[in-house]
Amino acid sequence: MFYRKDAAVALAVSVLLAAAGYATAGTTESTPAVTLDAAVVNPADAAPQGFIMQGLDRVGLPQVKDAGFNIYGWAEVGYTLNLRRHGHEGPIMPGPFNHEVGNHLMVDQGVITFERKVDPAKGKFDVGGMVQLTYGTDANLIHGNGLAFGNDSTAGKGGHADQNAYDPWYQLDITQAYVDVVIPVGNGIVIRGGKFVTLLGYETIAPQGNPFYSHSYLFSAVPFTQTGILGMYTLNDQWAFTGGITRGWNQALEDNNGAIDFLGQVTFTPTKAIRAVLNLSVGPQDEADTSHYRTTIDPVVTWQVTDQFKLGAEVLYTYDGGAQGFAPEGLSHAYGDMWGAVVYASYTINDYFTLNGRIEKAHVYMDNSATGAGNMNFYEITLGTTITPLAMIKEVGKAVTIRPEVRYDVSEDHVYTVGGGPEAYRDQWTLACDLIVAF
């Protein structure tokens, strides 16, 4: 969701993506490759030596590792400077994850994960799963409906945080809690049940899966998590399939409309260097509305051009036939769509430095059949670097990461506010940096 324009347009942007149900993408995904988003890495890989697990070994508890369990986590601290603002009030556009208050240090995430992976390739029955807890300023924005610890102000139970979600700033979230069961049929079918991160999107909530501290607009156009049942099957080295039903976008112990939706993914890996993923979500997502469907098509491609150079791209299209936030009095619903594209490029200079770039356009259209149609366009370009200052130390490796960036946003409308006040601009420069310590 985005935050404000001036008194009119800013509200329209916020309602557009929030009330239409556009949430935010991917969390930490540490699962069989069949369910991984194209850009996702296993966060445990950021600390491959497993500091927590090493500690358990040293105190005489190797049985935890021997049983296939892994305990790991990370902490992220960040700072965002808006070059046009000097106050500490209000979030920075575009939200919600680029919500750092200007000139203010934020503890974004403190995450602990308890996981037991399953391997369907072993051809035998197995049980695993994950419980993942997140604490920090990000946690207050990713609560599933009915599963909030703090201010449950997630946009009318649709799972999209409004500004009241920042009270208190630091909250706890059960980001994932699911069970995996392997059925030894063919290459092995994995059945997952519980609360898990969405399949949609290139970027993730877990910072290790992203090239930048800030997020794309498209990241703000798909859900964080979903709760339901998925079946996952890897046909061969090239094809993998995932499909199932969920309670909807960002729904957990409660459901905003009592209906289910379909969530699916097809992964095609023609070579070791190229991976293409097609994600699909279809179903009713709006509050107390089961007759109007939201359909999202989300292809994601990554290409490791050389050992040093990598490209990635995401295209997103969402149509919502029940965008209630734009339905005037007397009408049951509006309709609208959002589409966009984002391209990523990364070049690894050495073990210490990787250069990153991102360029994006996002388009939003809404028609409520009474006040007419409206279009809004957003553009951004971000440049930065990923620094691993301790890469020379084998025992630490990539456990410490620093990501400075410079970002320029521009829109055809006045949407970028200053200090939470009524004044807004068509463009915005921000400087940001975060520190990630994995353990």
Image (tube, rainbow, N blue to C red):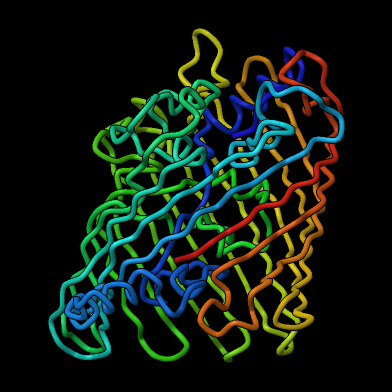
Q: Nearer the viewer, residue 194 or 297?
A: 194
As displayed, is residue 324 above or below residue 436? Answer: above
Q: Nearer the viewer, residue 221 or 369?
A: 221
The residue located at (74%, 33%) in the rendering is 103
Residue 272 occupies quadrant? bottom right
Q: Would you say 51 lies left or right of 382 here?
A: left
Residue 98 coordinates in the image, percent (x, y)? 65, 41
Q: Would you say 267 lies left or right of 189 here?
A: right
Of all residues shown, which one is farthest toward the top? Answer: 329
Q: The N terminus is located in which quarter?
A: top right
Residue 413 coordinates in the image, percent (x, y)? 83, 28
Of all residues shown, which one is farthest toward the front? Answer: 59
As displayed, is residue 166 above or below residue 60? Answer: above
Q: Would you say 366 lies left or right of 142 here?
A: right
The residue located at (55%, 52%) in the rendering is 76
Of all residues shown, which one is farthest toward the left? Answer: 125
Residue 120 coordinates in the image, percent (x, y)? 25, 83
Residue 194 coordinates in the image, percent (x, y)? 24, 54
Q: How many marks?
A: 0
As displayed, is residue 387 above or below residue 249? Answer: below
Residue 420 occupies quadrant? top right
Q: Nearer the viewer, residue 397 or 348?
A: 397
The residue located at (28%, 57%) in the rendering is 131
Q: Would you say 212 lies left or right of 107 here?
A: right
Q: The C terminus is located in which quarter?
A: bottom left
The residue located at (20%, 75%) in the rendering is 64
